[in-house]
Image (cartoon, rainbow, N blue to C red):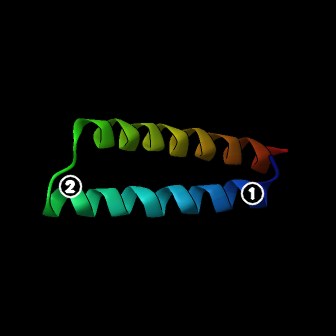
Amino acid sequence: MNHAMLERRSEILKKNIHQMIMQDNQYGISDQQNMLMQHMIKELHQTSHEMNLTDKD
């Protein structure tokens, strides 16, 4: 993936994670939603790592 696509993916993941955290703080989230949030956090870390690799090239 090119750097622009990785940046866009990162922004979308951050937005979705933020929304889930806000929902969790206000109302709580189900176990399934929590697993989804954890998966998105892992994807965000992976995307960040890929962005760092593309910066070095």
Quadrant of the rendering where the C terminus is positioned = top right
Q: Which mark is residue 5?
A: 1
Q: Helix or strand or loop: what does disc 1 sit on?
A: helix
Amino acid on which the number 2 mark rests in the picture = Asp
On screen, residue 22 above or below 24: below
Is tag 2's residue or tag 1's residue first in the polypeptide sequence? Answer: 1
The residue lying toward the viewer, choosing from 5 and 3, is 5
Q: In the image, what residue occupies the spot 32% across and 56% down?
A: 20
Q: Which mark is residue 50?
A: none
Which element is circle 2 on? Answer: helix
Residue 54 as seen in the image, left or right of residue 38: right
* Amino acid found under the numbered disc labelled 1: Met
| Residue 12 image position (x, y, % from top left) | 55, 61
Left or right, 35 with reference to 27: right
Res 46 quadrant in image: top right
Front one among 54 and 33 = 33
Q: Nearer the viewer, mark 2 or mark 1?
A: 2
Q: Are marks 2 and 1 in contact (CB under 8 Å)?
A: no
Q: Residue furthest right?
A: 57
Could you tell me which residue is drawn at 14 percent across and 59 percent down? 27
13 versus 35 height, above or below: below
Label 2 sits on residue: 24
**Is residue 1 left or right of 32 when viewed as pictured?**
right
Horizontal and vertical percent for residue 47? 62, 44
Residue 36's spot in the image, x, y percent? 39, 40
Callout 2: few (<14), some (14-19), or many (20+) C-alpha neighbours within 10 Å? some
